[in-house]
Image (cartoon, rainbow, N blue to C red):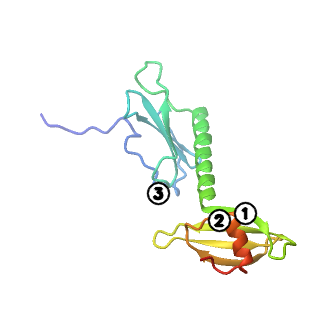
Amino acid sequence: MTDTSLPSSDTAADFTTEGLSALDESVHESRLWRDDGWTARVIKNEDDEGWAVEMIKDGEAEPALVGPWTMGRNKKDPKPLDTSAFNTLVKTASEVLRRHEQQLRAQLHKEVRVASADGNDELDITLDIVPDEDEPYALLTALDTFGEQLAQVQVAPNFKLSKASAAAWVDNEFRRPG
């Protein structure tokens, strides 16, 4: 008797979305649903006997969202994907990505408002961290009330922007801090 490999009945088993941004093919299967730049894939939950669903944005290697998935009526197989569930998953995964981008922006961008050197106006002082892998740095920028750039210097990425440090920079005529 020879051992022959049979094709997998689980079409989602070896599916990835890398390089799919050019493909506009929609797939609507019970465990694999691809549409509108997203792929939902129902997978076996490695932590227990249940099922999970992962949402992957086309072109991304990692899922934006992984969560538990409902069991079907037979309490053995997963509930099949459908349009309503897919749309809800897309909305949730998009929100996760949006919050992640906001958090990253908050970590890389700081802003304070201080008085100008003459005390007649207010200045917005921003710190934008550039997370370069080889040589990260930050840009300290002074903007007037009209948003016009008055000065900009490169500082260390761990520069601590506060009202006090911004005011000291303004008082020191925008010379590069220590």
Circle number at residue 161: 2
Q: Is residue 40 found left or right of 50 in the rendered image? A: right
Report the amino acid beneath label 1.
Val
Report the amino acid beneath label 2.
Leu
Helix, strand or loop status at disc 2: loop
Q: Is residue 76 found left or right of 67 in the rendered image? A: left
Q: Is residue 139 found left or right of 16 in the rendered image? A: right
Q: Residue at x 59, y 74 (%)?
A: 155
CA gap, disc 1 and disc 2: 8 Å
Q: Mark 3 or 1, which is nearer the eye?
A: 1
Q: Which residue is mark 1?
A: 112
Relative depth, front residue between 160 and 8: 160
The residue furthest right is 120
CA gap, disc 3 and disc 1: 41 Å
Q: Residue at x 52, y 56 (%)?
A: 21
Report the amino acid beneath label 3.
Gly
Relative depth, front residue between 53 and 81: 53
Asked whether the beta carbons under mark 3 and mark 1 sit within 8 Å of each other, the answer is no
Mark 3 / mark 2, whichever is N-terminal: 3
Q: Where residue 8 appears, x then y in whole percent?
A: 33, 38
Q: Are there few (<14), some (14-19), or many (20+) residues within 10 Å of tag 2?
A: some
Asked whether the beta carbons under mark 1 and mark 2 sit within 8 Å of each other, the answer is yes
Helix, strand or loop status at disc 1: strand
Mark 3 / mark 1, whichever is N-terminal: 3
Vertical placement of residue 65 versus 50, above or below: below
**Quadrant of res 46:** top left
Circle number at residue 27: none
Vertical placement of residue 1 versus 137, above or below: above
Circle number at residue 19: 3
Q: Residue at x 52, y 32 (%)?
A: 81
Q: Residue at x 53, y 66 (%)?
A: 131
Q: Is residue 167 found left or right of 75 in the rendered image? A: right
